[in-house]
Amino acid sequence: MIYKKQIYQPLSINGRSSRVDVSKMISLMDNKSITRNGEYIKRGDASFSIISIMKMDTVCGSIDVILSFFNDELVSVKYVNVSRYHISSGVCLNNISSKGEVYGSDVSIKTLFKENNIYYDIVFSDNVIDWKINKWVRKWS
C-alpha cells in the first residue's frame, strides 16, 4: 500500500489566505460590505491584525465575518451571529465545505451557540498557524 503525503494548504476564504490577497478581495466587494481594519499590533518580529467585514455575502447568508492574521497569514475565520431561524449550523457548515468558501488542510472548526441557542458563531482555525503563534509566544515569553 502506498501512502501519499498530504501537502499543507493554509486556511483560506474564497481561495485567499494572505492579508494582502484578502484585503484585495474585500476591496472588490459591493457597497454593502464595510471593512474596518480594527487592529494592527506589532510585537518583536511578528504582527497581529483583525479585519471585520460587516454583512458579507456568504453561503450561509449575509453575515458579519471576522478575519484574524498572524504576520501575513490567515489564522482564523469567524462567522458571527448566524441565526438558526435562517439556516441551521449543520446546513451552514455543509454549504461552506461543499462550496469551498473556507478551506484548509489542517483546520479545526468550532460552533459556539449563544443567546438561548438562537444564534451561533462558526470559527475556523488553522492549526499550523496556531502552532506558529504558540512557538512565537514561547520565544518571547
Image: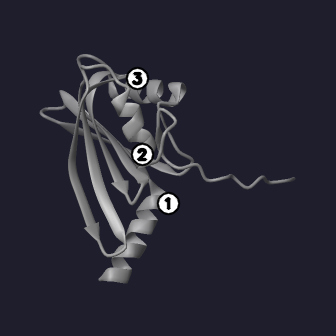
Give, as a three-letter code, the residue at label 2. Answer: Val
User: Residue 20 has which mark?
Assistant: 2
Q: Quadrant of residue 121?
A: top left
User: How many residues crowd mark 1 within 10 Å: few (<14), some (14–19), many (20+)?
Assistant: some
Q: Is residue 76 above or below residue 45?
A: above
User: Residue 128 has which mark?
Assistant: 1
Residue found at x 45% / y 67%: 132
Find numbered disc 2 in the image and state the secondary structure of the residue it sits on.
helix
Q: Quadrant of the C terminus?
A: bottom left
Q: Which residue is mark 3?
A: 91
Give, as a three-letter code, the residue at label 3. Answer: Val
Q: Position of residue 129 (x, y in %)?
A: 45, 60
The outermost residue toward the right is: 1
Residue found at x 57% / y 47%: 105
The span from disc 2 to disc 3 (Cα, nearest Å) is 30 Å
The span from disc 1 to disc 2 (Cα, nearest Å) is 20 Å
Question: Sequence-wise, which precedes: disc 2 or disc 3?
Answer: 2
